[in-house]
Each structure stands twice: as structure tokens, then as C-alpha cells.
Amino acid sequence: MEPGRIIFPLLGMTAIALTFPPLALGADDIADPNERAVEQKIPISSDSEPEYQQDGVSSVLVPQEPAPSHSSEDEVLLSATSGSEKQLMIHRRAKFASTTRDYVLAEELYTRLLKGSVEEELKRKVLFELAEMYLKSGENSKAVALYENIIEIYPGDPDLPGIYISLGIIYREMGAFNLAILKFYNVLNVSLRVRNKYIDEYKSISQKAQLEIARTYFMAGEYDTASKFFSRLKLLNLDDATRAEVHYKQAYTLHINGDFPAVISSLQGFFDEFPESRLVPESHFLLANAYKRMNRSKDALDEVVKLLSKTNNIPVDDLDSWLYWRKKTGNHIANNFYEQGNLFDALKIYQSMAALADDPDWQWPVIYQIGQCFERLNMYPKAREAYTLITSESDIQKEDFVPTDNLKTIQDMARWRLDQLNWNNLTDDRIKHLTNSG
């Protein structure tokens, strides 16, 4: 199913589609691709080289010099006599250009420095800053090539763990999951060469690497392996937001693998431990679905009602997320009840869903389903009332109302159902009149 499309099953197993803006959220949005590793400085012994492999990425020490783009002031700077002071001036100008997002000029200045004869300390700074600039500007292929080059030039550099993290995230964004995992494991490999007094610093980035490995397996669809890593991560001393993510994603992997009793147990503990987490609404979705898959209809209904009825203490920034998961959860469970003939529970959810938004794109499909439930329950006056709300002239004639093709279809179906009900009612009256006339 396309993201953001809600399917409402109709009588006779047909369906109408309701489209609402999809959100990039937890259950569907597995990891933040833009997250970058925090700079770590962990001195590593250079007695032996780190265990890394060539990944087939061509690396270049000096990027190709771009076309000149600097101002007359920069021309004066670049034409000045060479020397360490001149190099420092160019370096400061390059950093300023990068900070102000003048990436073309920054790359030109950094490249000019690398082509000259610069001290080793300045050369290292330039290489690292240029790689970071490529990340900021979205030029990931250049960042990868330069980072791989830095690893070869500085095999014992204290910043290598952070570089491996950044490379792993880039490779993951590119869909190269195996390469990404290899880079994250490189962070763990350097533990053999970390000096004892820096163990605490290493633990932090080591946990980061383990988290990224779990996220990568998760994104790659290797849920069994991801679940094992998330299980280990739950034993570590993580911050609250990360612990909530780890807890939720492990429950998600259990759900994918069909271990619904474990999902229920895990998510019940999740709500107790992380009641204010931003992952709470989608956790309700998982839990309600787990109950439904175990044929615990009452528990599934109760879980949906909990989600739909919560209105207070929701942070403003999370309102859209809560609305999205209310719609998704209510639609999914109500449709399931409807298809199985559990009309009373389906009706209860549809009635709660109608109040989630007041625009016709949301309300009309929900109201139509309410009418379908009433009709199948032989509550014809209520069904006519529902269909009439959709065909109401007062709503249709609003100046700013332009129905979409989907709304026109729903409207036509509501008119047809209304005509059928009115015809059935008239026929029943005529038959009653005939049978009573004698």
C-alpha cells in the first residue's frame, strides 16, 4: 500500500481510498539518515594498523580544483606571497566560507592549500574540514573518497572512530548495508589499541557503533539479527530517547517475526517506562495489531480507544504524529473488524475517527463507513442520516469547496445507497398497504 493512503472496505469487499499526508515516523521511518557522529578524540596506538579493508571506493588526496569563484578581495589573498602566515589566512578564509555555506569558494581554498607545501598539522585539519564540508553540502561521494583517503594517511589517528561512524552512515544511505556494517565494526576493532585512560571515551562511541549496526540490520530487513543487537543494547546505559527507540524497535522486530505474545509483553513495559516518548502513538498501533492477530478483539478495541481518546499533555511538536497514528490505527483495526463482520466494534471506532479532522477528505469516507455499518445492522434511519450528511447541499455549495474525484465517487455512492434505502422503504410501505387492505 502506498504510504499515506487509507483504504476503507465497502460492502461487497470494494474499497475507497482516503489520502492524507504521510509522516516520516518511527515504525515506517527506521532511522535518521542525517544523523552524524559526534567528534571523538580517542588516541590509538600506531604500533599496528587498524583492521580495515579496501572497499572498492576510489580515493583521491586532492579534489579536482573547481572553477574560480572568489571575489576581487579573494584574488588579492590568493595572489599574495607564499608562507605559513599566508596559509593560515587562506585556512581561516576557507573555514569562514564553509561556515557561511559558500562551498564552492571553500573547496577552492582548501584545494589550493592541499596543492601547496603545508605543515602536517595544517594538512590534517584541511583534510578533515574538507570532508566535513562535503557532508554538509550533500556531496557524499566526495566525502567517502576523502574519508577513505584519510584512513590510509592517518591509520592511528584519534578521530578514526568518528570517521568510521560517518562513513557507515553514508554507505547506509547509499544502500550499501554490508559496507556500512563493516565500518561500524571497525570502530569496535580499534578497542584493542585504545589506551586505558581513554576507555570511557571509547565506550561512548562503541555504543554508538553498536546502535548503528542494529539500525543498519533493521533498515536492511534483517530483523532477526537486528533484534539480537537491540536486545544487547537494552542492557547498556543509554539516554532515555535512545533506550525508547531500542525498546520500540525490538518490539517491532518481534511483531515482524510473528511473536505476538512477546510484542504484547514488551510494549506493555514500554508504556510503563517511557510514557512521554514520541514513539508512544505508533506503539499503540503495534500493540492493537498484536492483540487483533491473537484474536483478542476486546483488547484491540480498548487499545484503539486509548489512542483515539488521548487529548491532553501532548507536546505541540508531536500533534501531527499523534494524528497520523490515530488515523492509521483506527482505520486498520476498524477495517479488520468490518471485514470480519464485527460491526459493532467497527462502528464504535469509525464514530470516534470521524472527529479526528473536519475536512471532507477525511470525514466523508469515515461517515460512509458508518452508514455501511448501520445499514448492515438494519438500522436504516441511522444509515440514511449518515449518507445524507455526505450529499448535503449546504456543504456542497460552499464557495471554496472543490470536491476531488475521490470525493465525487463517495458522493455518488452515498446518493445511490440513499436512493436504494428510500426505494426499499417505499416498497415496504406499499407491501404493507396491500397486505392490510383486505
Image (cartoon, helix red, strand yellow):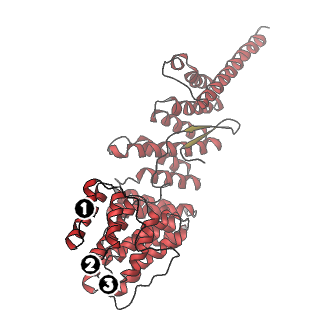
- Decide: few, some or many residues near mark 1? Use Cα within 10 Å; few <14, some 14-19, many ≥20: some
Q: Is residue 58 left or right of residue 88?
A: right
What is the number of the mark on residue 119?
2
Say which of marks 1 and 2 sits in front: 1
Which SS class for mark 2?
A: loop
Q: In this orientation, does residue 234 appear?
A: no
Instruction: Please identify the quarter of the rendering in which residue 158 is found.
Output: bottom left
Mark 3 or mark 1: whose residue is earlier in sequence: 3
Image mark for residue 115: none
- Mark 3 packing: few (<14 Cα in 10 Å), some, or many (20+)? many
Position of 126 compared to 20: left or right?
A: left
Q: Label 3 belongs to which residue? A: 44
Q: Give residue 275's position: percent from left, percent from top.
A: 35, 54
- Which one is nearer the viewer's eye here, 52 or 306? 52
Tell me the mark number nearer the camera, choosing from 3 and 1: 1
Residue at 31% in and 75% down: 124
Residue 77 disc label: 1
The picture quadrant where one finds residue 159 is bottom left
Residue nearest the viewer, comparing 13 with 376: 13
Q: Position of residue 103 (x, y in %)?
A: 35, 57
Quarter residue 161 falls in: bottom left
What amino acid is at disc 3?
Ile
